[in-house]
């Protein structure tokens, strides 16, 4: 009897949830359930085309800079390849001094395979916001959201600035949770995100507390959509990033619907590992790409330095994650273990894509990259030491 009641309660809950959302969204949720790196195949998309002049990293896979074995998280002297493969890694790239010194693929993945960025896309959104301000499409980060989305003025968004959204201190009522009782899973499969965005409310005074929120990122997307019209976020990404970076492969932004939908900037740019690495290189060089300033250097600095004003956290700024404050390193991170790690002081970029984080937690992956970076830097210094002169034959 108890089991029957439990099952009945579950059915009632599902029905109650179903009537509050569109049948299309609920149907997608039931059909596809958990998210995965191949989800770009199930969403409508707008394509990004490979550059007519692709740029490729110089390669040298014989440097010996990347260790074969590593000690990390209680694992002593273990194979790096095994560690990556056994923890659901798909792609692993290391770029040192602008040279690709490691490029490895696991678990059936290869160089040409596309993979979903998940929340690394938030960092790409930040780049587009910076470009839009430089181009005069957006006035300033201190502009109120209601200037661009006047429908939200009565909901208090006249007090929310673009910078609040960038720092995730806007105080929007949006719980980052996969629970069926929360917005987040339904937004992932929704076919009209703009309608949902216009129903958002505040739960606290803006600029008082940091809280991770995909909803706040999607408000940035809505602002971009409004200021770019009739062009799309995809068009702007093509012009400001994909073409000038010399992207080697086609990519795509997933959208909620076609033809008039909005790009899912909080989760869903699908691309290849090599082209993701170019985003890291762009920020490694303060927005400069081979002599062309694609992103304002000041924007890059503000995005990757600690600023705890407005309730902001010391580990997050302008949609980028900051490694240990003072280290100078930062990263773009996404669900299931998608990472672009950038360490400008060591001239190092590491890209890791995967189907999950494996049995390595988010915090442990955050520790993994500095450990590997330190080992690579030590090997680099050793190789740069002048060799002792050869013994004289006399």
Image (cartoon, rainbow, N blue to C red):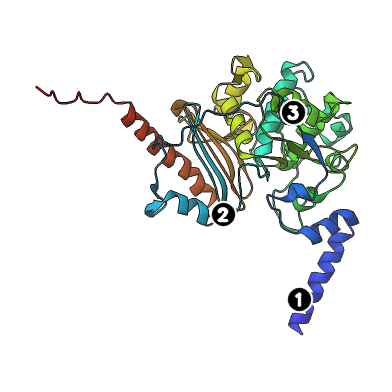
44 or 225, which is in the foreground?
Answer: 44
343 or 164, which is in the foreground?
Answer: 343
Q: Rounded to the nearest whole Å, what is the CA distance between mark 2 and mark 3?
A: 30 Å
Q: Rounded to the nearest whole Å, what is the CA distance between mark 1 and mark 2?
A: 35 Å
71 sits to left or right of 258 = left
Give above or below for 109 relative to 283.
below
Is residue 207 visible to the viewer in this orientation of the structure?
Answer: no
158 sits to left or right of 55 = right
| Residue 237: numbered disc | 3
* Marker count (numbered): 3
- Residue 369, horizontal then vertical, whole percent: 47, 41
Q: Residue furthest bottom?
A: 1
Quadrant containing the N terminus in the rendered view: bottom right
| Residue 129: numbered disc | none
Q: Rounded to the nearest whole Å, what is the CA distance between mark 1 and mark 3?
A: 49 Å
Residue at the image position 12 percent from the left and 24 percent from the top: 393
364 or 149, which is in the foreground?
Answer: 364
- Residue 299, horizontal then vertical, whole percent: 63, 21
322 sits to left or right of 119 = left
Quadrant containing the C terminus in the rendered view: top left
Secondary element at tag 2: loop
Secondary element at tag 1: helix
Is residue 2 visible to the viewer in this orientation of the structure?
Answer: yes
Foreground mark, 1 or 2, reads 2
Residue at mark 2: 88
Crowd rating for badge 3 (residues with CA inside 10 Å; few <14, some 14–19, many 20+): many
Give above or below for 359 relative to 128.
below
Residue at mark 1: 6
- Residue 70, horizontal then vertical, whole percent: 39, 47
Upstream in sequence: badge 1 or badge 3: 1
């Amino acid at each position: 009897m108890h089991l029957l009641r439990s099952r009945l309660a579950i059915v009632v809950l599902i029905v109650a949830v179903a009537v509050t959302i569109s049948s299309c969204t609920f149907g997608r949720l039931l059909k596809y359930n958990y998210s995965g790196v191949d989800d770009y195949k199930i969403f409508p998309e707008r394509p990004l085309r490979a550059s007519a002049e692709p740029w490729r990293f110089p390669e040298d896979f014989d440097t010996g800079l990347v260790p074969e074995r590593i000690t990390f998280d209680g694992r002593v002297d273990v194979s790096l390849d095994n560690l990556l493969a056994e923890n659901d890694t798909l792609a692993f790239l290391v770029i040192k001094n602008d040279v690709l010194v490691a490029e490895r693929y696991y678990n059936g993945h290869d160089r040409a395979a596309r993979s979903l960025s998940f929340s690394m896309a938030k960092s790409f959104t930040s780049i587009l916001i910076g470009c839009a301000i430089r181009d005069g499409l957006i006035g300033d980060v201190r502009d109120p959201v209601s200037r661009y989305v006047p429908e939200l003025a009565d909901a208090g968004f006249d007090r929310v600035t673009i910078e609040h959204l960038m720092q995730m201190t806007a105080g929007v009522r949006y719980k980052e949770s996969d629970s069926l009782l929360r917005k987040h899973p339904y937004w992932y499969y929704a076919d009209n995100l703009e309608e949902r965005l216009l129903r958002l409310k505040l739960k606290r005074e803006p600029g008082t507390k940091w809280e991770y929120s995909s909803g706040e990122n999607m408000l940035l997307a809505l602002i971009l959509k409004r200021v770019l019209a009739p062009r799309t976020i995809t068009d702007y990404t093509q012009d400001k990033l994909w073409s000038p970076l010399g992207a080697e492969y086609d990519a795509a932004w997933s959208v909620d619907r076609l033809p008039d939908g909005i790009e899912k900037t909080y989760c869903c740019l699908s691309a290849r590992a090599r082209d993701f690495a170019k985003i890291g290189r762009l920020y490694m060089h303060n927005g400069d790409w081979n002599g062309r300033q694609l992103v304002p250097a000041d924007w890059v600095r503000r995005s990757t330095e600690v600023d705890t004003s407005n309730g902001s956290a010391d580990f997050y700024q302008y949609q980028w994650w900051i490694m240990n404050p003072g280290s100078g390193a930062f990263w773009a991170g996404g669900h299931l273990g998608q990472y672009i790690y950038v360490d400008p002081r060591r001239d190092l970029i590491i890209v890791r894509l995967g189907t999950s984080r494996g049995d390595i937690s988010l915090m442990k992956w955050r520790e993994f990259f500095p450990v590997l970076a330190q080992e690579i830097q030590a090997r680099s210094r050793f190789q740069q030491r002048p060799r002792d002169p050869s013994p004289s034959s006399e």
